[in-house]
Amino acid sequence: MPLVAHNALPTFQRLKQEGQPILELDRAHQQDIRELHIGLLNMMPDAALAATERQFFTLIGQSNQIAQFYIHPFSLDELRRGDIAQKHVDQFYESFDRIQEEGLDALIITGANVTRPNLAEEPFWSPLIEVINWAVDNVTSILCSCLATHAVLQFRHGEPRFGLREKRWGVYSHRVHVRKHPLLQGINTKFDVPHSRFNEISREQFERAGCHILAESEEANVHMCMSADMFKFVFFQGHPEYDSISLLKEYKREVMLYARNKREDYPPFPEHYFRPLETAILDEYRGYLEEALLAGDPLPEFPEYLILQSVDNTWHDTGVAVIGNWLGMVYQVTHQNRKIPYMDGIDPDDPLGLKAG
């Protein structure tokens, strides 16, 4: 079944206009169908708050149609926001107190912007740890995105992330490591995922924490793994929720920062994202921009309109499939009282399934 519009969150109306099935609350109550209640702890900064919310709603709504999906967004008071974003949170998001009172079947935790080298020094650290501790005891499974993955590895396993020499930025090819794991059912053994980060957790750190590596890239390293029990935590370092144009928008923001003297160097292109025609257009724009800056003239318009329709999305289907498999596993545990056959049929001497072809 589709997402249930159980409040006035504008995302429901936008997704409906885009053609995604949305079930109104009164109709949902008329149907004798199981519910799954999924929390979304959205810690993203103001500029990405609504987009991240919509992206995860889309993945869930297009995934495994096994139940009525009720998504409960919430945030942390310690995340400082501007007036518009704070009004959105105050009007449409739930409080953590209410989340705790009513309970969840699953929880997604997004990334966040950071200002300090050590995550434990961030203002949101203590309340985030409170949410994680509660979820470990009360939620069937927790999916962590990017910074949330780094926070859990540091807090629960003493494995702090480390800074990269350059930003990991682009769309990278990944290979499946444990082909028969239920989280990977029905997906290609090779697939793309966008990455965008300055820090990472290494394969060795994940392994020291007892995690099982499920998908990895030669260029971008570990994207997806699971906690030692193969179910309580799902860890992402990439961003399968990204829209087709998310990296384009991010590149544009970096160019504008350069134009306003807020970054020293002109930003490089995200890797494996733009095609030759798009890079030519953007290189030409850079020339116009540099001339305008030297002359003190108004900045030329960024040629976003020439590129919006031409960037490809090579990761969305896999993201939908993984989220659908994850929710299917949650459903089995919460509503069918079944144990997940985490490693059934997996040869410990051949976890990649190479012998079977």
Image (tube, rainbow, N blue to C red):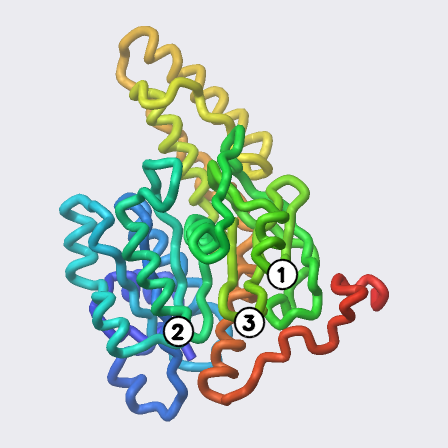
| Residue under the image location 41 percent in, 69 percent down | 136
Question: What residue is shown at x 44% (from left), y 41% (from top)?
Answer: 308
User: In this rendering, which labeled residue sits more in front, label 2 or label 3?
Assistant: 2
Q: Secondary structure at mark 2?
A: helix
Residue 304: x and y in percent read 40, 34
Q: Is residue 142 left or right of residue 16?
A: right
Residues at marks 1 and 3, CA–CA distance in whole angstroms = 17 Å
Can the viewer see residue 242?
A: no
Q: Number of numbered discs present?
A: 3
Figure quadrant of residue 2: bottom left
Residue at (33%, 20%) from the top-left corner?
259
Q: Amino acid at mark 2?
A: Asp
Marks 1/2: CA distance? 21 Å
Mark 3: which secondary structure?
A: helix
In x, y percent, where is residue 284? Answer: 48, 20
Which residue shows up at 39% across the image and 73% down it? 137
Q: Using the image as rendered, state which of residue 19 and residue 126 is in the foreground.
A: 126
Q: Earlier in the sequence, mark 1 or mark 3?
A: 1
Q: Amino acid at mark 3?
A: Asn
Which callout, 1 or 3, points to the residue nearer the camera?
1
x, y (%) of residue 227?
Answer: 55, 63
Q: Using the rendered view, name the quadrant where residue 226 is placed.
A: bottom right
User: Crowdedness of circle 1 by 10 Å Cα count: few (<14), some, many (20+)?
Assistant: many
What residue is shown with label 3?
325
Mark seen at residue 137? 2
